[in-house]
Image: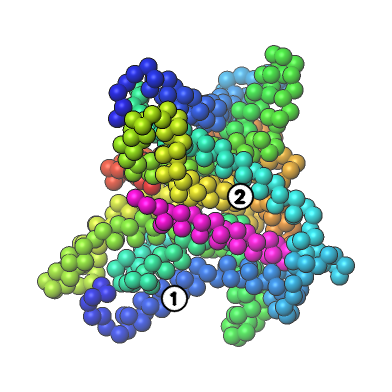
Amino acid sequence: MERVSAGTKLTVLVLFAPFILWMLLLVILPHIDLLTISLRERVAPRVYEFSFKNYMEFFVEPLYWRTFARTAIMSILATVLTLIIGFPISYYIAKIARGRLKSSLFLLCMLPFWVSELVRTFGWMILLRESGIISGVLQWLGLADGPVEMLYNDAAIMVGLVYTSMLFMVVPLVSTLDSLDDGLIEAAYDLGGSTIAILREIVIPHAMPGIVSGCIVVFMLTLGNYLTPTLLGGKDSLWFTEQIYNQFITRFNWEQGSAFGFLLLLLSSAIIWTGLRLTRQRLQDTIK
Amino acid sequence: MLASLPRSLPSRIIYGLYVALFFLYLLAPLVVVATFAFNDSVFPSLPWKGFTLDWFISAGDNGRLGLFYDKPLLESVGISLMVATAVTLLSLAVGVSNAFLFERHDFPFKGFFYMLMLMPLVIPGVILGISILVFSNSIVNALDNLFLYEAEFLRPGLLLVVLGQFSFITTMATLVISARLRKFNVELEEAALNLGAGRLTAVRTVTLPFLKPALIGAGAVAFLMSFENFNTTLMLVGSDAPLTITMYDRLREGSTPVINAVSLFLMVLSAALALMSMLSGRKAPE
């Protein structure tokens, strides 16, 4: 660390300037503005008054809060499913696969992240639609008489969300499971522990930090997702980010849209905060 | 269960099957998108009608417009390249400055500012987009009211798209570059100073070359994140649409396999950038 002198003080100021400009102009002030706009009501053309009307509207209009609740519940479900599907895979990569197989499986898990979400979702559209691959395979096997439409429903949304989220669950899980000493598991077997008991008593408690940080990231990304629900869910996907988009772009009701935006931000932050509290982790350690 | 412990045959088969199925699930959508770019049909769906390169090279004379002749699509690729280049350069510049600020210096409320720096990663992209939209509109209105000046460039458009993407990609760039800077031995820089180099010269000739792998890695990821961004872009886009927006519109209308062709192009681009970022990380000397 350098000694403080006039020169270093100047350096700090020069380095601080771009940082604070970035933060103020693109993050802090825009969010303050968003909050202000969400708290005003248009009473006459170009005349606004302070009001909670936009937030009241959210609770009064069933469509709004139901969409919000639906988005939250579907996101929780997607998170749980991602964990359940991803855990055995992570365990396989961390504890069973060895050498080349291990590193190539891990890289394979990263693959979808590198490909645009739009392309991934498009892939699912080709697979699931009426004239798609899965429908074709089912007919070929004789399991279906005619084309089967699997797109545009909640299950399709869920498949897409879990797919998109998988990487963010597998990476933290593999790294915590990797740090678990094999000797502990061997010792537990030697002492006569069953696989289930070992999983419950040793593996899962050790992997807990990875489970929590994976779940936080997956939940946050799912909640804020827009592409997957709109493309795979069709017109009735009822995702909350879609409501925000509609208010802003289609209806041009920026006050209402801002209020929705803030509600989503609150929910997302609350989940992150609770998750960090539960594991006694700091944000700095989770984002890596 | 461990690699070193004996396991019963059925359990091994079931576990192996599950892992295989999982990777099938992971790869199926990507394989399908790539394959159907070569289907000799106007829909990207079954039945398979044979192999064709029409969706890349057909000039429209047989009723099919291939990727290399699809002007709107090519234009949006150009726009995306432009936006991504601007975002990459900007975020690398600010990222380096931030890395030096947080790794090398102490200043009041440093912990608080560090937390603030991480914020853009935990704010949903849609909300970053609308907040910047709202704020730029407020500035436009204020300028109009106070100075009767029409700040057209702050209306939704490419500048806002660049700023919106820059706002969160910079955090990522800062984290990658900081991690590398932390490994730097400050004595090397001091040696340069002792040998008579000025402060800036020392940083330019000693520290920045050391950071090069991180700059390449962060640059590749920043470029890719910008090129593929949808959520923030959607809220800030004007009449010039980047590729993701154009593709989204086409997907909703139900498009020809030209979309598969452009997706394949995107996959190749991602693969190249991913390779670049991974190699830059691996080769980095400690």
Q: Quadrant of the N terminus of chain A?
A: top left
Label number found at residue B20: 1
Chain letter behind tag 2: B
- Extent of the magenta region: B257-286
Can the viewer see residue B277?
yes
The correct choice, above or below, for B93 with respect to B1 in the image is above
Q: Kindly identify the amino acid type of the residue bearing the numbered disc 2.
A: Phe
Q: Earlier in the sequence, mark 1 or mark 2?
A: 1
Q: In this view, does B31 lie to the left or right of A285?
A: right
User: Magenta-highlighted stretch: main secondary structure?
Assistant: helix
Instruction: Reply yes or no: does residue B265 show up in magenta.
Output: yes
At 41% from the left and 44% from the top, the residue drawn is B210
Distance in Å between CA atoms under marks 1 and 2: 31 Å
Q: In this view, does A78 lie to the left or right of B61?
A: left
Chain letter behind tag 1: B
Give neighbour class at mark 2: few <14, some 14-19, many 20+ (Cα, 10 Å). many
> What is the secondary structure assignment of the residue under circle 2?
helix
The correct choice, above or below, for B45 with respect to A116 in the image is below
Q: In this view, does B98 lie to the left or right of A278?
A: right
Tally of numbered tags: 2
Label number found at residue B227: 2
Q: Kindly identify the amino acid type of the residue bearing the numbered disc 1.
A: Ala
Label number found at residue B6: none
Q: Where is residue A218 in the image (x, y as percent from the top left)?
A: 44, 52
Q: In the rendered view, how is the structure colored?
A: rainbow
> What is the secondary structure assignment of the residue under circle 1?
helix
